[in-house]
Amino acid sequence: MTATGVPDLRRELLFTALGGVEGGSSLAFTIFQEIAVGIVEGRLPPGHEVNSAELARRFSTSRTPVREALLLLERESLVIIPPRRRPYVSPVHMAQVREVYEIRASLYALVSELLVARATDEEIDGLRAWQGLLAADAEAGDVDAYFWHNVGFRNAESSLARNGELQRRLGSLGLQMHRFRHLSLSLPGRLLHSVADHERLVNAYADRDADLAAAVSRSLVMRGYRAIERSGLV
């Protein structure tokens, strides 16, 4: 993956979330994408009701693509579909946030170790393009752009580790993981801390210091968790 625009990153991430799902229409994906991005970026908060009839009218379609989209959202744990009630955005529980962040911290520490061992100097230099985007986003205070470019940075890292099973494990955490990440990055002061951590991480890669890279990566992830924990929002 190369550094690219925010809309392209959104599409790439959400198409990945549909991996293995058959029979979904392009319209169902469009509806899925709109709702998923709204949930991940925090515009649709926990408990927000998803009105199927309204969505069908907005997209000039029948209920069938809407149902397909909602089932995809339910699979990603972003929406709950109770019997005989409207679907609604799933709640966020601190215990789940902690567990996801603990898994992410361990997996990304392994990504960093493998990246140091397997990536070329040119590939590590490529991560600096992502770092430049993050620095620009942080300076502008653009949380949404920073978040999606951060997703791109992490996807680029995992591909450079050259371990398909590890990538699949990370992907299995789904869009719920990204929902938590966006929440963390939206908290006061988080962008500046995050961009500084990413710069230290890229420097550790360039120095071929696997131990330091793994430690920085683990610390970077858990700093995000601690920010959510301190915020009292969950």
Image (cartoon, rainbow, N blue to C red):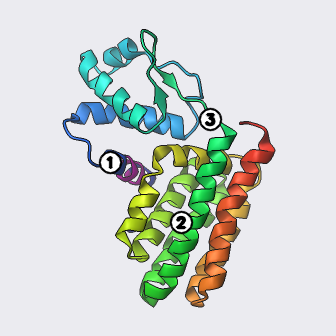
Which dot marks residue 15? 1
Upstream in sequence: badge 2 or badge 3: 3
Q: Report the number of discs.
A: 3
Amino acid at circle 3: Val
Residue 210 sits in quarter: bottom right
Residue 193 in sight: yes
Q: Secondary structure at mark 1?
A: helix
Q: Is residue 193 magenta?
A: no
Task: Tell me whether the residue at label 3 lies in contact with that at label 1, contact meaning CB atoms closer than 8 angstroms.
Answer: no
Q: Is residue 10 magenta?
A: yes
Q: Residue at x 76, y 46 (%)?
A: 229
**Region of the chain picked out in magenta, as a range:** 8-15
**Magenta-highlighted stretch: main secondary structure?**
helix
Residue 77 pos. (x, y %): 47, 36
Reading the image, the residue beneath label 3 is 92
Upstream in sequence: badge 2 or badge 1: 1
Which quadrant holds the N terminus?
bottom left
The crowding category of the residue bearing disc 3, from other C-alpha atoms within 10 Å (few below 14, some 14 to 19, many at least 20), is: some
List the single residue furthest toward the top: 84
Rounded to the nearest angstrom, the CA distance separating label 3 from label 1 is 23 Å
Amino acid at circle 2: Leu
Q: In this orientation, which residue lies closer to the viewer: 168 or 202?
A: 168
Reading the image, the residue beneath label 2 is 107
Residue 127 pos. (x, y %): 50, 75
Name the mark nearer the viewer: 2 or 1.
2
Which quadrant holds the C terminus?
top right
Amino acid at circle 1: Phe
